[in-house]
């Protein structure tokens, strides 16, 4: 009975009670079971309960006291070492002394590692099934220490059991086990292995960690911990697999489509919490490890995520994402990001304007980052500017035809936006409406992006970009159907304005020491032709573009307003004379430039903005091209403008005439301070003072303002209020300008060329009619006989007039060359068309003569025979 049993029963006591020579009874053997050595029963009442506990300990491989402890020493040593690391109370933690013994044994006998790992995994699985999570943590900690200690070639023997154990923990329904397993995986990912593994798979971990990043646990703190663990797990997977070609390819689309959205979801919820911070670190590391062939697979899920969650609108999060991308990837790969964005912009050409504007804004930011180099964070003073050289990666991006591809895509978006703005729909079916406000927002973003891209290019490529944009500007009568058929003239005008704005964005930061390079004939001539357009906005843009390209010292920003008290000391002036290239530019293009400025001032639609831009252009020309010749030409031009305002031959309004006088006064005041002798400045100052007293409406302070003060009725200007040509010439006499005095006495009369007459005053039909009239006049002249009798006198006269004939032929050739260089396209097209018609008529006459029948012997005309080329032959005769 239990009451008669002693308080403590031990095995030696039992053996002592047996007869001498009797063998003790054999106990049943339990493979892989360690029996307890001693069973202690402190009290008689607790004996049944303790006996049950001892049985459970035997089945659970616990080392405990009891009658079965005699067989524990017969078990394999690695199992005994593993059992010894588990304490009786799990709260005591891992038995460190026994763990050191196990580690020493594993290092001494590495062939036992697989058995040790399998046994530890078995113990952990059993404890997990019995919900004894304390022992689970101890078993996992033991496996971690063995992994960290075994840096030999046999570590693969541990890894499979270890990863299998982590799968069990991640499949459990306990969040703290997920966090525990993730921490162990991160430690394993940081281990550098010496030998490759051919059979591992991390697909499960990618899926599970990505799922943890989307956790929606009810408890906010637990949700944050789970998401952070998922992010750290993905980071560990990337570290473990990205540098090992034998591992699973983490850059495959099926993996990237899980990893990238999981990171972006947490990055999107950026509120200063730890998930966003950890996400950004992981995202940067992922992109920093991407090779050339992996960039597209990493960027495509980003674009898909932004599309699916409508994150392009507003642009804040999308811009932040691509800032991280551009600063994280290797600089030589960043052009792939630009190409991906351009392709995505084309793919969304029929999306709402807010989406397209968001993509364009991201493109602009990416171009700015690309220009500064995309390695590391931006420095505080790393803003791209004209003096900052673009990175080599961007030069790789925009080398060759890729430059035109970038700008062609952006310009195509401008044209499409104009079509959408005019029709009111951004699709062909007419189902999705858009507004002018949204489309104008998109257009401004595209223009800004064009400037951002162009400012990252070297000078020679910016010239090519300006020529490319100039070639895209529609000219009325030549490209009337640019864009959609519904656009019409208004659409062409809008495209002209936007492309000129884009051109202005490119030219604002264009720095070139050579004006011949900045303004070649192929660019300057079509640009100047737009100064003759009816639209005042177009003329203003052209004047601004010319000023920005000529202004190499950025003096235009220092001219805040048109004033007769402007002090030239605020301008940065040249210390030396004009260079050889500047002199060539003056000789080649100066007169053409003056002529278009003069003709632009005749437009009735000019306003204060146009006159202010004209004043700035004249000041910049006088400062940049400082020479006696240029200053004298500008003085002659201003005197001609003053005469235009006095005589009013162009029937200008009173406001326009007063504005012309005001511009002349302000410009002459500036010119008189740039080197001419003091008498010129005295004369200009005297006239200005007279106007201030008696005619303030002839000064810019009273006219070129928001509320101009002009006289009622017709404008009458007293001669005392005008700048006198003879006095100016007298003031320049006796100085270095004496040689130019004769030119000042000659009034400036711009020669109107065919380009000026045909630029906008004539249509194509008028041009063709003019050409036909010219041909008719030429045909009406008496023609010389085709045959002429050759005599001695004829040969003598020919020899004597040979020089004159050669000179005449040379002059005609020069006229032909000049016509094709300076004439507008309409005139050349009409000339070629008329010559083609004339050639066709002559060919018809030749064909008629060829097929004409021979004369009949009877003298009667025969019937006209069928031409050979009109005969129909049987099929069998055709070879």
Image: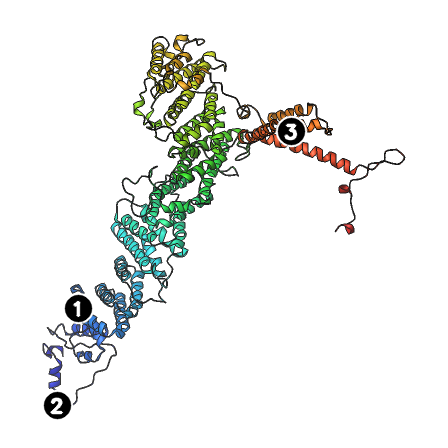
Left or right of 140? Residue 605 is: right
Disc 1 target residue: 87
Which secondary structure lies at badge 2?
A: loop
Which secondary structure lies at badge 3?
A: helix
Q: Is residue 454 above or below residue 648?
A: below
Tell me which residue sits at (20%, 75%) in the image: 80
Residue 92 appears in view: yes
Q: Give how far across and how far down residue 289 sits, in percent.
A: 33, 54
Which secondary structure lies at badge 1?
A: loop
Tell me which residue sits at (75%, 42%) in the image: 869
Q: Give how far across and how far down residue 750 sits, in percent.
A: 49, 20
Q: Earlier in the sequence, mark 2 or mark 1?
A: 2
Left or right of 75? Residue 242 is: right
Rate crowding at label 2 as few (under 14), some (14 to 19) or many (20 or more) other CA atoms within 10 Å: few
The one nearer the camera, 369 or 55, is: 369
Q: Is residue 728 above or below residue 505?
A: above
Rate crowding at label 1 as few (under 14), some (14 to 19) or many (20 or more) other CA atoms within 10 Å: some
The one nearer the camera, 826 or 618, is: 618
The one nearer the camera, 201 or 773, is: 773
Disc 2 target residue: 19
Q: Give how far across and how far down residue 871 sits, in percent.
A: 78, 43
Q: Nearer the viewer, mark 3 or mark 1?
A: 3
Q: Earlier in the sequence, mark 3 or mark 2?
A: 2
Rate crowding at label 3 as few (under 14), some (14 to 19) or many (20 or more) other CA atoms within 10 Å: few
The one nearer the camera, 33 or 594, is: 594
Disc 3 target residue: 799
């Amino acid at each position: 009975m239990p009451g008669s049993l002693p308080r403590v029963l031990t095995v030696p006591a039992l053996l002592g009670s047996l007869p001498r020579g009797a063998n003790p009874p054999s106990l049943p053997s339990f493979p892989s079971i360690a029996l307890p050595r001693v069973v202690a029963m402190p009290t008689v009442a607790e004996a049944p309960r303790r006996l049950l506990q001892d049985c459970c300990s035997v089945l659970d491989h616990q080392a405990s006291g009891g009658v079965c402890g005699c067989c524990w020493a017969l078990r394999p040593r690695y199992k005994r070492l593993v059992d010894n690391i588990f304490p009786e109370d799990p709260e005591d933690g891992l038995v460190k002394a026994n763990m050191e013994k196990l580690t020493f044994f594993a290092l001494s006998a590495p062939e036992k590692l697989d058995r040790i790992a399998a046994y530890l995994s078995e113990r952990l699985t059993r404890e997990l099934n019995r919900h004894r999570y304390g022992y689970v943590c101890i078993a996992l900690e033991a496996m971690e220490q063995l992994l960290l200690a075994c840096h030999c070639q046999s570590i693969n023997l541990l890894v499979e059991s270890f990863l299998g154990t982590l799968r069990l923990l991640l499949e459990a329904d306990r969040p703290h086990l997920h966090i525990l397993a993730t921490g162990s995986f991160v430690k394993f990912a940081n281990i550098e292995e010496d030998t490759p593994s051919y059979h591992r798979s991390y697909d499960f971990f990618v899926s599970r960690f990505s799922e943890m990043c989307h956790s929606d646990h009810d408890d906010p703190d637990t949700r944050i911990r789970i998401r952070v663990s998922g992010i750290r797990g993905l980071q560990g997977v990337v570290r473990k697999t990205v540098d090992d070609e034998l591992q699973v390819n983490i850059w495959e689309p099926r993996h990237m489509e899980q990893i990238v959205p999981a990171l972006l979801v947490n990055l999107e919820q950026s509120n200063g919490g730890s998930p966003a911070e950890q996400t950004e670190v992981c995202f940067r590391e992922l992109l920093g490890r991407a090779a050339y062939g992996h960039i597209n697979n990493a960027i495509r899920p980003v674009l898909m995520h932004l599309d699916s969650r409508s994150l392009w609108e507003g642009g804040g999060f999308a811009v932040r994402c691509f800032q991280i991308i551009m600063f994280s990837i290797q600089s030589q790969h960043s052009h792939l990001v630009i190409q991906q964005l351009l392709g995505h912009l084309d793919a969304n050409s029929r999306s709402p304007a807010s989406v397209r504007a968001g993509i364009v804004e991201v493109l602009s930011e990416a171009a700015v980052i690309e220009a500064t180099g995309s390695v590391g964070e931006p420095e505080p003073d790393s803003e791209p500017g004209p003096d900052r050289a673009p990175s080599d990666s961007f030069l790789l991006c925009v080398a060759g035809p890729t430059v035109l591809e970038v700008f062609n895509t952006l310009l195509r978006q401008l044209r499409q936006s104009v079509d959408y703005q005019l029709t009111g729909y951004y699709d062909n079916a007419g189902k999705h409406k858009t507004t002018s406000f949204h489309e104008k927002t998109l257009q401004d973003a595209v223009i800004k992006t064009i400037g951002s891209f162009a400012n990252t290019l070297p000078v020679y490529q910016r010239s090519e970009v300006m020529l490319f944009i100039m070639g895209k500007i529609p000219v009325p009568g030549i490209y009337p159907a640019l864009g959609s058929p519904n656009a019409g003239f208004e659409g062409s005008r809008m495209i002209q304005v936007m492309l000129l704005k884009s051109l202005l964005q490119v030219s604002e930061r264009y720095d070139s020491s050579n004006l011949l390079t900045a303004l070649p004939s192929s660019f300057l001539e079509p640009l100047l032709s737009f100064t003759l357009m009816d639209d005042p906005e177009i003329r203003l843009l052209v004047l601004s573009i010319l000023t920005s390209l000529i202004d190499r010292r950025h003096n235009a920003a220092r001219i805040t307003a048109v004033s007769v008290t402007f002090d030239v000391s605020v301008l940065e002036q040249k210390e030396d004379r004009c260079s050889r290239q500047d002199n060539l530019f003056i000789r080649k293009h100066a007169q053409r430039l003056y002529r278009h400025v003069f003709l632009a001032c005749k437009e009735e639609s000019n306003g204060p903005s146009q006159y202010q831009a004209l004043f700035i252009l004249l000041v910049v020309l006088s400062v940049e091209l400082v020479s006696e010749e240029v200053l004298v030409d500008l003085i002659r031009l201003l005197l001609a403008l003053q005469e235009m305002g006095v005589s009013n031959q162009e029937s200008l309004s009173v406001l326009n005439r007063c504005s012309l006088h005001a511009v002349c006064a302000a410009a002459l005041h500036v010119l008189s301070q740039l080197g001419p002798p003091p008498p010129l400045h005295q004369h200009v100052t005297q006239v200005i003072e007279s106007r201030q007293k008696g005619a303030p409406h002839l000064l810019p302070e009273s006219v070129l303002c928001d509320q101009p003060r002009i006289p009622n009725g017709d404008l009458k200007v007293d001669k005392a209020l005008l700048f006198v040509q003879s006095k100016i010439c007298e003031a320049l006499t006796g100085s270095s300008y004496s040689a130019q005095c004769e030119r000042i006495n000659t009034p400036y009369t711009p020669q109107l060329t065919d380009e000026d007459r045909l630029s906008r005053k004539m249509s194509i039909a008028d041009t063709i009619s003019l050409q036909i009239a010219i041909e008719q006049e030429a045909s009406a002249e008496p023609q010389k006989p085709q045959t002429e009798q050759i005599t001695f006198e004829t040969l003598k006269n020919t020899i004597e007039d040979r020089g004159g004939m050669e000179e005449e032929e040379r002059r005609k050739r020069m006229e032909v060359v000049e016509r094709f260089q300076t004439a507008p396209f309409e005139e050349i097209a009409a000339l070629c068309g008329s010559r083609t018609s004339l050639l066709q008529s002559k060919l018809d006459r030749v064909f008629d003569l060829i097929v004409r029948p021979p004369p009949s012997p009877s003298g009667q005309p025969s019937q006209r025979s069928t031409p050979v080329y009109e005969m129909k032959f049987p099929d069998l005769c055709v070879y």
